[in-house]
C-alpha cells in the first residue's frame, strides 16, 4: 500500500530515464521507509513535525514541571524542549539557588521560616489582555506548599515567589483574569486557615477552603501581596478554576471534589477517602464575583484578618451576592470557560458526560434570586438543570477541555478511556475521537484557553507511557503527544517523552508573541531587572577587605577571570561579585569555586554574586564552567585560604631550568612572527567582510562587532609587551605577545563564523541543473577524492573549468572517458602526485552537463 | 528542484487515473513541504529520525548534564530525551535528596564534611568487557568538586558517590579500563594534594597533579575505596584520558595543558593564564601502566599516604618503568585510543593538526629505554617524532575524536572551524567535513570509543546554538546535532536543543544491550538494591511511638494511602516508611507532606523513607503526587501536629443535615445497582479477553494481571459492606460499597486498556484496497457524520453491508447517488431520525469499491 512511492510504479512501467532520475530522492525515501518500517502516515507526520537546522517553531509551550518544581519550555510542532526554568527547586546550571540574587528569590518562598527546596508545579498561566495571551510574564503554582511564582519572559528567569498565607494545599492556581488584574489560586485539601491544630473531628467547623486573589502590578511585573486578598469557602476540596470573560467577565469559577466533607480513616477501619469523597452524584461548582469581592475587601466588617491577610467571609460574600454554588457532575476535574465567556464546560471524572453550563441562564437565576436552596454554609445553590445548556456523553473519565479556533468546537480528555474527544458544545454532539497513550490528564490546543484560540494542534498530557519508549527503569517518562487537529479527523503526529517530572498542565502561545532579550544591559541583576550596585567594568576589578569580610569585584571575558588569585584567611566571609563583560549573545560564562557549593551562570552583561565562609584551609581552584572559547580551560584562578593562626614554612623551591637569553630571543621572534601571520589571516577575513558589505546583514554584523571587540583589546596588551621588551624583560614580553595571540584567536573564531554566515547570505542560488549536478557529484562519489576548496586525495576542482582551454568541453570529455587522457602530460603529473588515476564513473551525458553547471556555481562562489 | 514529488510530474503528463490516485499521499506531502518550506533533504532527514508512536530507538545516549549535575538519557535517531537521572544535584521528582535512602547517597558525596548539592558533570563512561560496552553501570565525574558517581542501569538510579581524597579539581574522568578493573580519574588544575595552604609561589614544589585508579567491584556494583589508589604527577594540568586496550592493554594515557606551569596573575599586572599556559608549542602526554602501578601500591615504600589514601610517587613510578611523557601538540584536549589499541590520536586545540601516535613505536622506545630526556620532575620523555604514525592538518581547533565501524576511520571535532572532519588515521588523509552549529566540543559515534564501534551516526555536542532555536532568553540551550555517517558524505539530520545544563560529553550504547527493570521486587530499597528492613505489606501498616520518635509504616496503592491520619506532637521526630504495593509497571506513587520539604517517588514495589521534625503546629495535608488513577486527588491524608503544651478547646460543632433512614436505603440500593451494572461491564470485558486468549499476548497478559489484582481486592471490601449492612449501619455499608466501586473503576481502567491492546494484536491486517478505502472515507469526510462503532450524527456503519439485502451493491448505489434513495422507507426514517440527508460525495467507482472493502474489514473486526 505504499502509494507515496509512485516512482516505483512509474519505473516498473518502464518510463523514460528522466522520470526515473527524478525519482532518485523518492527511491532514497523508499529505502529509508523500508529499513525503518515507516508507513506513509508516518512520513506525513514526520514532515509535519520535523524542523531543519535553524528553523523556528510556530508555538512555544510552557509546561509545569510537576514534582521537579521547574517549568519546561518546548516548541510545537517540533516537540523539542528548549529550556527548564528553575522555579521552586534550585538549579545549578542557571545558578538558581547557588548565587545570592536567586537565593533571595527562593528565600522569599520560605513558609513559616522554613526554606522549601522543591515544588509540585501544576498550572502555568500567561499574562492576558482582553483574554488574549501576552508573552510578558508566566505564573506557576506549587500544590504541595501553596505558593505562586512569577517568571519574567524577558529573560525566562523566576523573579518572585509569594507564599499563600492561609491555605495548606492548593490546586486551582494559577488562573488569570482577562486583563491580568488578578492571579487566582484556589485551595485543594481543606484545612484550618490559621496555623493552629484542629482535630479532624472538627472538620466541618474548623476546616475551610479558600480562593486567593493575587493582585498583579503589571508595570512592576510583581504580585502586590498587600493588595491581595482571599475568599473563605466551605471545606469542600476546591479544585480547578477559570476566570470568566466576555459576558461572564468579573466572575470566576472553581469546582470541587469531596463536597461530601468525608474525613477518611482507613487506619481506623473506615473506608478510605476515595470511597467517601465519591459518594454523591454531584459536587459543587463555586461561582464568585471578584469585582464585588475586591470592594468587600476594602471594609473590615467583611473580612477576617488571618496571618496578616484579608479573608472575605462566606457570610459577607453571600450577603453581597458575590458567591453561589451549582451542583456539578461527580468528582469533576476541569472547568473551562468558552472563548466568548458564554458557557462553562465541566468534565465530571466519575461521570461519562461533559456538562455545559450557560452563563446567561446562571446570571438570570442570580439576578432573579431564584435558588434551589442553600448549602450547609448558607451559600445559595442554583438549580443545575436550569443552568444547563446541556450534557453530552463522552466516555469514561472526562477531565479537561481546550478550545478550537472554530466556534463551538472543544476537545476533552478522557482519562480512563485514554482518548481525546472532539465535540460541539453548542450543538451538543460528538465529532471525532482519537486514542492516546495512555491515561491523559490535561490537554491543550494552541492558545486554547484564551479568548482567541488558534486551533491547529492539540497536546495530550498522558500520565502513563508504559510501552511507548525505550525502557529507562521503573520510573517511566510521561508522554506528551502532538495531534494535528486542523482537519476533520484528528491525527496523531508525535510522541514526546518527558524526561523530568510529571508535567501537570501546559499553556501555549504563538512564538511571535515572545520577544526575549538575548543579552543584558551591562551590569544587570537579572532577578531585579535593574543595574546591580556591584556591576564591575574592565579596570574596576578589586578586592576590598573589612575585618572578616572580603569583597571581590571580578570580571569575566573570553578567556580569563580577573582576579586570578584571591587570598583570604580561614573563617573570612567571602563575597565575589562577578560581571560578564561580553556583549555577544550566547557568550555565557559560569563560575564556581571548588568545595564551596556555589555556582553562577553569567550571561552576557549579567552581574551575579556568590558568597561563602571560607571555613576550610587550602588551595581551591575556581574556573569558568561554560565552554566559552577555545581557551576556556585556562579561564581559572586560585582561592588560597590561609589559617591566620598557623605558621607556614616555605617549601624548598624546586630548581627548574630557565631559558637562556638566546632561547628567549628566539621564542620572542617566533611569537612575533606567529602573531604577524595570524593578523594577516584576520586582515584577509576583514577585507572579505568589508568588500561584501557585511554591515548589510544584521546577524553577520553582530558577529563582526563581537570579533572587532576582541580585536580592539589587542593594542593595550601589545603596548605591555613592547614596554616589557624595551625594559629588557623578554620573558614578560613573550607572555604578553601570547595574550595578543589569544585575542587574535578569539577574533578569528568569531570572524570566521561571520565570514561563513556572510558567504551563505550572498551565495548565488543554485540553478536546478547545478543542484542536480551536485547530487550526481555526490552520488558518483567524486567527493571521495575531490574536496571542494582544498587539495585532498585529488585536486581541488575550484577553477578546473578555467585551468583548461575550452574548459567545459575538456572536463566533459575527461569525465566521459578519463583513460583517454592518462597519457596527457598534465594528467600524468597529477597521477604521479596523487598516486591515483581518475576512474570512469560511467556518468550519463546529462549528469556530466549538470556537474559542469555545479562546477560553474562553485567558481562563482569561490572564496566564500 | 522538488524531484521527490514525481507524482506532480506524472500527473502533469496526464497519465492514467490509477497513478494519480496513488499520488494522494504524495500530494499531501507536497502540500506540507510547501507550507513548511521543507526541501527533499529535509524529508529524508525527517524520515531517518522520526519515531512513530511506540517505536523504540536503536541507540541510547548517556550524556553528562554539565553544570546541572545530572545525567541526561536520550535516544538515537529520534533525539528524544527519556530521562534526567539525579546524580550530584537533588532532584525532587525522583525523590533524590528528598527521601532518606537517596540523602544517604548524596551525603556520601560530602567533602571535608561539607554537603555539596551540585556538580559539574563531564565524562560519562559505561562498564566494559574486552573493551566493548556493557549496559550494567554508568560512571560520571564532577569536575568542580572531584567525585565519581556510580549509576545502576538496572533502575537508572545513582547508588554511590566517592570523593577524591587528594585532588581539588578534575577533568579526565571517568574512563574505564577494558574489563572495568578501574575507573580512572585525572586531575585538572594542580593544587597541593594535602588539604593545607601553600603559596602560589611554591607552585612547582608544593602543587601536584594526579590520576586516581578507583577499583570497581563488579559483583557488588560499587567502587571499593580502600582498594583504590593514585599516582602523583607533576603540576601540569592533566586533562582528558583514555585507557589502552588490545596491544596497549595495561597502559593509560592522560594529556595535559599548562605544562608551562604558569601561575597567572592578571590582577598583579601579569598576563593571564590563557597567555602563559599556551606559550609552548607542545604539552605532555602522560603514559603510565596501571598494572605495574597497582603492584607498586601494595608496598609502602612506593607510596605516600595522604588523607588516608595511597599515592604512588613519581619517583617510584619512574623507577618501575611505569610512567613516561611524550610531547604532544599545543594545549591538547582529546586523547583517544583506536579500537584496536594500536594508535593514540590527539587534537591539539591550538594546533591545526591531529597527531597520531603509534603505540608499537612508543613501546619499542620504552623497551629500549630510548629517551629524549627527562622533564623537571625526572620523568623520562620520549621523542615525539619517533613515536608518531603521523600528523594530518584538519583545521582550526581540533578537540575530540570518535571512531567509525570501518577500520581506520575517525571523526574529529573542530571547535573554531565549527566542523566535524572525517579522516583516515592509518593513511593520514582527510575524507570529508561537515559544518556544525556552532563551536563543537566533544563528539560521539555509536559506541565510538569502544573496541567495537558501530558507526552509523555521529553526534556533535555544539557549545553554542546562537540562532538555531526559538529564543528563550540570554541563557541559550546547547545544540546536539545528529549526523548520518553511514554514507561517504556526512549528512546533518537533526538539531536537538539541550534544555538543561551544558552536556560535556556523551557515551552511546546499542539499546538492545540495556535491560532495565520496570518494577522492583516488593519492598526494595532502590539505593541498596536490597529488601528494605522497612518494607510494609498490606495489613502491616502501623504507627510506632518511642518517646519523641514516631515511626509510620505506610502503604500506597490506587487510590489510597494507609494511614490517612497521622497525629503527632510538636517537636516529634517523624519517620514515614512508604511501600508502593503496586505490581503494574508505570504505577508510580509520589508522597509529600505540606511544609516539611520532603518528597518520595515510589515506583511499583519500592520502599522509601521520609523523615522530618514536626516543629510547626498545625494541619498538614499529605498526598500522592503522581496522577496514578482517576481518583488520585483523593489519595491523601492529614498530618496533625499538636502542641503538647497547649490546651485546645473544641470548636463548636456545625450542625449539618444527616440523611433519613429512607434516603439512606435508597442510596444503598442505588450503589448496589451501580456496582452490579459496572460488574457486568467488567465481566463482558473479561469474557472477551478470555475468548480471545489474552494469555497468549504477554503485554496484554500483564495488564489483565493488574486488572484482576484490582478486582481481587473487592471481596474483602464487599464483606465489610455486607457486615455493616447486617449490623444496620447503612451509612457505613454505602461507603464500603463505594470502595467496591472504586476497585471496579480501576479494574475497568486497566481492563479496557487490555481489551484495546488485545484488539490491536488480533485485528485482521487491512488489505491495500481496504486501506485505500479508509483513506477515501476520511478524505470524503464520511467520518463527519458516521463514527465507526457508535451512533453519531449519522448511523454506525458497522454491519451496514449486512443490514441490506445484496449489501455491497446497495451501499455502492447509495453512495453513488443518495438522492435516488431519499424516498425509500428505511432512508426516510433515517433522515427523520438524524435530521440530515446523506449527500452525494462524488466518489469515483474505484473509491466506492475501496470503501466497501474498508467496511468489510470493519465488520470482520467489529467488537474489538
Image (cartoon, coloured by chain):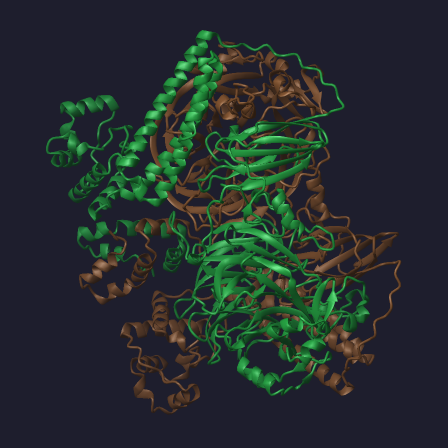
Chain colours: A brown, B green
The answer to whether A15 appears left or right of B334 in the picture is: left
In the figure, residue B600 lies in which quadrant? top right
Of B800 and B160, the residue lying toward us: B160
Residue drawn at the location 18% of the way across and 55% of the way down: B15
x and y percentages locating residue A377 in the rendered image: 58, 13
The answer to whether A128 appears left or right of B728 in the picture is: right
In the figure, residue B490 lies in which quadrant? bottom left
x and y percentages locating residue B491 in the rendered image: 42, 64
Of B528 and A544, the residue lying toward us: B528
Work out whether residue B278 can be spotted.
yes
Taking A533 as reference, is A32 above or below it?
below
x and y percentages locating residue A745 in the rendered image: 63, 70
Work out whether residue A186 can be spotted.
no
The answer to whether B397 appears left or right of A388 in the picture is: right
Which residue is farthest left?
A: B806
x and y percentages locating residue A358 in the rendered image: 44, 20
Query: Quarter of the image containing the C terminus of chain B?
Result: top left
Query: Quarter of the image containing the N terminus of chain B?
Result: bottom left
Taking A717 as reference, is B522 above or below it?
above
Amino acid at each position: 500500500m505504499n502509494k507515496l512511492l509512485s516512482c516505483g510504479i512509474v519505473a516498473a512501467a518502464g518510463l523514460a530515464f528522466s522520470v526515473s532520475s527524478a525519482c532518485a530522492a523518492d527511491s532514497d525515501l523508499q529505502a529509508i521507509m523500508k529499513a525503518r518500517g515507516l508507513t506513509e502516515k508516518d512520513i506525513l507526520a514526520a514532515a509535519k513535525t520535523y524542523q531543519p537546522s535553524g528553523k523556528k517553531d510556530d508555538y512555544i509551550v510552557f509546561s509545569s514541571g510537576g514534582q521537579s518544581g521547574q517549568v519546561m519550555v518546548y516548541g510545537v510542532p517540533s516537540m523539542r524542549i528548549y529550556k527548564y526554568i528553575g522555579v521552586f527547586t534550585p538549579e545549578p546550571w542557571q545558578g538558581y539557588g547557588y548565587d545570592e540574587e536567586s537565593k533571595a528569590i527562593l528565600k522569599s518562598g520560605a513558609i513559616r521560616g522554613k526554606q522549601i527546596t522543591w515544588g509540585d508545579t501544576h498550572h502555568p498561566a500567561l499574562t492576558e489582555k482582553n483574554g488574549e495571551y501576552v508573552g510578558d510574564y508566566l505564573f506557576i503554582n506549587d500544590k504541595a506548599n501553596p505558593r505562586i511564582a512569577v517568571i519574567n519572559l524577558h529573560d525566562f528567569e523566576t523573579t518572585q515567589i509569594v507564599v499563600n498565607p492561609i491555605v495548606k494545599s492548593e490546586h486551582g492556581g494559577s488562573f488569570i483574569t482577562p486583563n491580568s488584574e488578578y492571579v487566582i489560586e484556589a485551595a485543594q485539601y481543606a484545612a484550618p486557615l490559621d496555623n493552629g491544630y484542629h482535630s479532624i473531628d472538627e472538620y466541618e467547623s474548623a476546616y475551610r477552603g479558600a480562593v486567593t486573589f493575587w493582585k498583579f502590578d503589571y508595570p512592576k511585573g510583581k504580585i502586590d501581596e498587600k493588595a491581595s486578598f482571599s475568599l473563605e469557602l466551605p471545606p469542600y476540596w476546591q479544585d480547578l478554576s477559570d476566570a470568566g470573560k466576555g459576558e461572564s467577565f468579573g466572575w470566576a469559577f472553581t469546582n470541587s471534589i469531596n463536597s461530601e466533607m468525608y474525613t477518611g480513616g482507613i487506619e481506623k477501619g473506615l473506608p478510605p477517602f476515595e470511597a467517601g469523597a465519591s459518594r454523591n452524584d454531584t459536587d459543587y461548582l463555586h461561582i464568585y464575583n471578584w469585582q464585588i469581592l475586591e470592594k468587600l475587601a476594602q471594609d473590615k466588617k467583611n473580612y477576617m484578618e488571618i496571618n496578616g491577610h484579608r479573608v472575605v467571609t462566606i457570610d459577607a460574600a453571600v450577603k453581597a451576592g458575590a458567591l453561589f454554588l451549582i451542583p456539578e457532575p461527580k468528582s469533576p476535574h476541569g472547568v473551562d470557560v468558552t472563548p466568548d465567556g458564554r458557557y462553562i464546560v465541566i468534565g465530571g471524572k466519575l461521570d461519562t458526560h461533559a456538562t455545559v453550563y450557560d452563563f446567561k441562564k446562571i446570571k438570570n437565576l442570580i439576578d432573579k434570586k431564584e435558588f434551589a436552596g442553600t448549602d450547609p454554609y448558607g451559600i445559595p445553590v442554583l438549580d443545575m438543570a436550569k443552568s444547563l445548556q446541556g450534557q453530552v456523553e463522552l466516555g469514561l473519565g472526562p477531565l479537561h477541555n481546550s478550545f478550537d479556533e472554530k466556534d463551538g468546537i472543544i476537545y476533552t480528555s478522557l482519562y480512563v478511556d485514554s482518548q481525546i474527544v472532539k465535540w460541539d458544545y453548542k450543538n451538543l454532539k460528538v465529532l471525532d475521537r482519537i486514542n492516546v497513550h495512555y491515561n491523559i490528564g490535561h490537554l491543550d490546543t494552541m492558545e486554547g484557553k484564551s479568548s482567541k484560540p488558534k486551533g491547529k494542534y492539540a497536546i495530550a498530557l498522558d500520565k502513563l507511557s508504559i510501552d511507548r519508549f525505550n525502557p529507562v527503569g521503573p520510573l517511566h517518562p510521561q508522554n506528551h503527544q502532538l495531534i494535528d487537529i486542523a482537519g476533520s479527523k484528528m491525527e496523531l503526529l508525535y510522541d514526546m517523552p518527558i524526561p523530568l517530572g510529571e508535567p501537570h498542565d501546559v499553556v501555549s502561545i504563538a512564538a511571535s508573541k515572545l520577544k526575549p532579550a538575548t543579552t543584558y544591559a551591562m551590569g544587570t541583576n537579572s532577578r531585579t531587572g535593574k543595574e546591580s550596585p556591584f556591576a564591575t567594568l574592565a579596570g574596576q576589578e578589586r578586592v576590598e577587605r573589612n575585618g572578616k569580610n572580603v569583597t571581590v569585584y571580578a570580571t569575566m571575558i573570553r578567556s580569563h577571570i580577573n582576579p586570578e588569585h584571591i587570598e583570604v584567611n580561614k573563617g573570612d566571609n567571602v563575597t565575589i561579585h562577578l560581571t560578564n563583560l561580553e556583549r555577544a549573545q550566547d557568550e555565557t560564562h559560569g563560575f564556581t569555586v571548588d568545595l564551596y557549593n556555589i555556582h553562577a551562570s553569567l550571561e552576557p552583561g549579567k552581574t551575579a554574586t556568590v558568597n561563602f565562609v571560607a571555613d576550610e584551609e587550602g588551595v581551591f581552584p575556581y574556573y569558568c564552567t561554560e565552554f566559552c572559547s577555545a581557551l576556556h580551560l585556562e579561564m581559572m584562578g586560585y582561592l588560597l585560604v590561609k589559617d591566620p593562626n598557623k605558621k607556614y614554612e616555605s617549601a624548598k623551591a624546586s630548581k627548574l631550568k630557565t631559558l637562556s637569553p638566546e632561547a628567549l630571543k628566539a621564542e620572542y621572534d617566533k611569537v612575533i612572527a606567529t602573531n604577524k601571520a595570524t593578523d594577516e589571516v584576520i586582515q584577509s577575513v576583514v577585507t572579505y567582510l568589508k568588500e561584501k558589505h557585511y554591515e548589510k546583514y544584521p546577524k553577520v554584523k553582530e558577529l563582526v562587532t563581537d570579533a572587532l571587540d576582541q580585536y580592539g583589546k589587542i593594542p593595550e596588551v601589545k603596548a605591555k609587551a613592547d614596554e616589557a621588551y624595551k625594559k629588557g624583560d623578554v620573558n614578560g614580553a613573550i607572555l604578553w605577545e601570547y595574550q595578543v595571540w589569544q585575542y587574535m584567536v578569539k577574533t578569528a573564531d568569531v570572524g570566521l563564523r561571520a565570514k561563513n554566515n556572510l558567504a551563505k547570505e550572498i551565495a548565488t542560488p543554485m540553478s536546478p541543473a547545478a543542484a542536480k549536478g551536485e547530487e550526481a557529484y555526490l552520488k558518483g562519489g567524486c567527493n571521495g577524492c575531490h574536496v571542494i576548496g582544498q587539495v585532498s586525495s585529488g585536486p581541488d576542482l575550484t577553477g578546473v573549468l578555467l585551468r583548461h582551454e575550452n574548459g567545459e568541453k575538456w572536463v566533459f570529455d575527461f569525465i566521459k572517458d578519463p583513460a583517454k587522457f592518462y597519457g596527457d602530460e598534465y594528467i600524468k603529473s597529477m597521477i604521479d602526485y596523487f598516486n591515483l588515476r581518475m576512474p570512469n564513473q560511467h556518468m550519463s551525458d546529462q549528469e556530466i552537463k549538470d556537474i559542469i553547471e555545479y562546477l560553474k556555481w562553485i567558481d562563482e562562489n569561490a572564496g566564500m
